[in-house]
Image: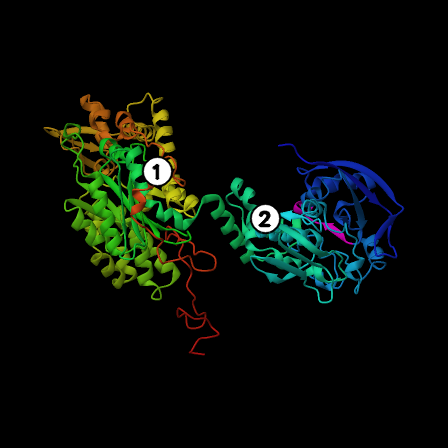
Amino acid sequence: MATKKIIAICQSGGEFVTNKDGTLSYNGGDAYAIDIDDETELDNFKSEVADMFSCSADNMTMKYLLPGNKKTLISISKDKDLKRMINFVADTMSVDVFIISEEAAARNISNMPASRSSRTTVSEAVVPVVAADDVDMTNAIDMPEGTPLSAIPPDSNDDSHRKAAQQWENTITGLGQRFNSFTEFREALHKYSIAHGFAYRYKKNDSHRVTVKCKSQGCPWRIYASRLATTQLICIKKMSSKHTCEGAAVKAGYRATRGWVGNIIKEKLKSSPNYKPKDIADDIKREYGIQLNYSQAWRAKEIAREQLQGSYKEAYTLLPYFCEKIKETNPGSVVTFTTKDDSSFHRLFVSFHASISGFQQGCRPLLFLDSTPLNSKYQGTLLAATAADGDDGIFPVGFAVVDAETEENWHWFLQELKTAVSTSPDSQQITSQESQQITFVADFQNGLKKSVAEVFDKCYHSYCLRHLAEKLNKDLKGQFSHEARRFMIDDFYAAAYAPKLEAFQSSAESIKSISPDAYNWVVQSEPEHWANAFFAGARYNHMSSNFGQQFYSWVSDAHELPITQMVDVLRGKMMESIYTRRVESNQWITKLTPSKEEILKNEIAVSRSFQVLLVHGATFEVRGDVVEIVDVDHWDCTCKGWQLTGMPCCHAIAVFECIGRDPYEYCSRYFTTENYRLTYAESIHPVPNVDRPLVCESTEELAVTVTPPPTKRPPGRPKMKQPESVDIIKRQLQCSKCKGLGHNKKTCKDS
């Protein structure tokens, strides 16, 4: 992208003079010209100027005047100010920059009109050059008090404001002008009032006639339009075009309705989906001279988004059609939805055939269950089941949009998920060392503990370590100091990851030494569901349910879309991911996936320092820093690394080297390149006409009525999701006098 280049005419050594009309002139001194652009840094600019004028860069102040406004000096104190100056004067291609030393600044300011406040408003007769947030007005020089608005020159606004206004100055031309409808006339009048800077009100406004007058009391401006006889056209029949008011301009901002702003920002929002309300307000202020607050800008963005993306309400109406289209374009997919008794949306489940097939054919029998809130217009929650591919990449299997995260909805989700993954893969692909019982890594709350066991009767449920640690921290809050709780959380993680019973007990004893109550909590939290020393399932050392963070980032990018479009965006992301990984894996020449190949090579390097002794049969003793026993036939080592990860540990590899076995033959099949390619063998196909179905296609499906859920997004900024870990524990308030928790010295009762 080409950078904006302008000529900075740097002037120093002169003096400012205030003219009779309040404008400023700069007389005397020397001038030099410097080329600058929006890549120029302020420090470099100052250094070059200092060399030219033989002065110190540290003791200089830089100021400039905006085009069309010779009354207010703007300070340049940081890089952001310099870039703004370049943007403001880009059309003029040059700008006068005044270099003022500290001594000269003190001398000049005494000749300037006094500035009342950098916060002075338009209604107090100060020129509204730019928004207060956009320019540092601390050192700005305002107009004298009492200057009437009529004295402000018509070109006092910046160039971009004039350009925006000029295109609307002639939307109303006078008597006899015709319009196709009253809506068109009102829109033209709206733009005309903004371009000419006045406010108006309706005296008559119905389907037959419209009479409008200037809102300023006593001003003669008015306009009358009605239907042209025997036609459907609307014609201006009376108009008094002169204004005598002087203060109406400052009130014109109230005419900036949400719908009008929405139309203005629609195109920019289309190219920049993350267009922030603050930026919207700043742009409207700069381009149209109208000040919006955050709430007005936010609501205008909502209107513009709905115009671009379609109606949220209509998306629910199209849900039956959308579900049928998914099954038609992706045969074998499981897509279901339910409504409540009043036909309002309840829940939607989606699992694409490519996801089902990929999980069955190539992924480990391991699923992560988690949820994320949806901050869309009608709120809701997304429930998801993700798997891990052979390279430990995220592989979404199924997801659901539900009205709330409840025990009932989780139970329903698991039933639909079981339907999707119920078909078993080819039994010949499964070795005797690997069971097909699915292991779930999920929270134990919200009814999941009960639902997982009921729906998948033969499965393993690993409690999510993150949720457990959060509950432990919450239950201990208020009882222990910040440091004590941190030590207990660390010991808890150590106990969970400990591969052997002895290591688990050692960590548990460390917790007990801090608090017997905490020790009892750990013992009663069912360690057989989370501790490596006791857990019977195969979770391949994945301990937390938030494994699918990439998938949830896709959701956060699309959650504000109407429901059908949000699902289609997720479908597109999954489709792209499958294709990309398929293409990448076709280039691999290793037997294992890249990450597992690297792990195996590291273990091989470590194994070379071990001594191997045959005990009997297929059992070997491996001596290093410690002695471990390896059973080759049962893929077992007393270090437990082989069983926990599915990859042979360094002790087992030492045995393979000794007896001439290939370590690749003892890696889980799920980590092979061949299996990885099976995961991504099937494709997800596009779903056409997601938001605008053909009438003939959708007639039958739309016979089922689906209306939006009754919940709506509450006012205010959406709440952020809780942190994903408890590694950083908030320090608890502690009294410096009595050392008690939960209060400070000032509120201590012992004082």
Identity, as a three-letter code, of the amino acid under mark 2: Thr
Q: Nearer the viewer, mark 1 or mark 2?
A: 2
- Percent across and percent down for residue 530 are 23, 49
**Quadrant of the drawing holding the C terminus:** bottom left
- Percent across and percent down for residue 574 are 36, 36
Look at the picture and state if 172 lies above or below 682: below
Instruction: Give the magenta range.
Output: 72-81
Q: Residue at 36% across / 53% down in the picture? A: 708
Image side of residue 302 versus residue 580, left or right: right
The kind of secondary structure element at disc 2 is: loop
Residue 296 is drawn in which quadrant? bottom right
The total of numbered circles placed on residues is 2
Q: Residue at 18% across / 23% down in the picture? A: 659
Q: Report the Cα–Cα distance between label 1 and label 2.
A: 36 Å
Identity, as a three-letter code, of the amino acid under mark 1: Cys
Q: Is residue 689 visible?
A: yes
The kind of secondary structure element at disc 1 is: helix
- Magenta-span inclusion, residue 735: no
Which mark, by number, is residue 231?
Answer: 2
Residue 481 is drawn in which quadrant? bottom left
Indicate which disc, 1 or 2, sits on the residue closer to the N terminus.
Answer: 2
**Quadrant of the drawing holding the N terminus:** top right
- Magenta-span inclusion, residue 79: yes
Estimate how packed mark 2 is, as few (under 14), some (14 to 19) or many (20 or more) residues with alpha carbons within 10 Å.
Answer: few
Q: Residue at 69% across / 51% down in the picture? A: 195
Q: Could you say which is closer to the camera, residue 587 or residue 45?
A: 587
Residue 327 is drawn in which quadrant? top left
Q: Could you say which is closer to the camera, residue 177 or residue 129?
A: 177
Look at the picture and state if 144 lies above or below 306: below
Task: Work out which residue is located at the far right of the displayed protein and give it.
Answer: 28
Q: Which residue is mark 1?
A: 696
